[in-house]
Amino acid sequence: MSVVTYRIPNISCEHCVHTITMELGDLEGVRSVQADAQTKITKIEYEPPATEEKIIELLKEINYPPEQ
């Protein structure tokens, strides 16, 4: 299992947290998502077939791009 942590500046409320959690949760291979509106930090645990590239791509698609 792999873990990535991102700072996502666009997280501003619990609706944002819910959207990120639900969208990433639907990505095959994602095991857990912990997003925090106050710190703007999101931690994702995943395994194949999910990849970090797929996670970043999905975050960009839903308008929550992580800081690089």
Image (cartoon, grey):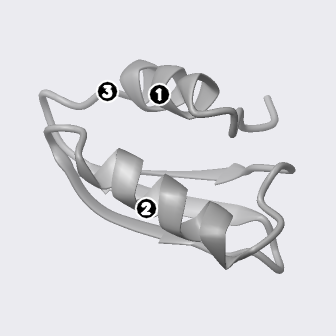
Task: Single out the mark in the foreground, 2 or 3.
Answer: 2
Residue identified by numbered label 2: 21
Marks 2 and 1 close (CB-CB < 8 Å)? no
Q: Earlier in the sequence, mark 2 or mark 3?
A: 2
Apparent side of residue 54 relative to residue 1 in the rendered image (left or right): right
The residue lying toward the viewer, choosing from 57 and 63, is 63
Q: Which residue is denoted by mark 1 in the rendering?
A: 58
Q: Residue at x 13, y 32 (%)?
A: 48
Write down the residue under mark 3: 51
**Percent from the top left, x then y, of residue 64?**
69, 40
Q: Secondary structure at mark 2?
A: helix
> What secondary structure is marked by label 1?
helix
Compared across the picture, whether 40 is left or right of 59 comes to right
Q: Is residue 22 left or right of residue 35?
A: left
**Gap in angstroms between the C-alphas marked 2 and 1:** 12 Å
The CA span between labels 2 and 3 is 16 Å
Which mark is first along the chain, 1 or 2? 2
Q: Is residue 61 above or below residue 62?
A: above
Q: State how far apart marks 3 and 1 are (Cα).
A: 11 Å
Q: Earlier in the sequence, mark 3 or mark 1?
A: 3
- Residue located farthest toward the front when viewing the structure as drawn: 15
Q: Quadrant of the C terminus?
A: top right
Q: Amino acid at mark 2?
A: Thr
Q: Amino acid at mark 3?
A: Thr
Residue occupying the point 81% across, 36% down: 67
The residue under the point 77% across, 59% down is 11
Q: Is residue 61 visible?
A: yes
- In the rendered image, the vertical position of residue 57 relative to residue 7, given as above or below: above
Dot 2 and dot 3 residues touching (CB under 8 Å): no
Query: Viewed as shown, does residue 26 lie left or right of 8?
Result: left
Please give the label number shown on residue 22: none
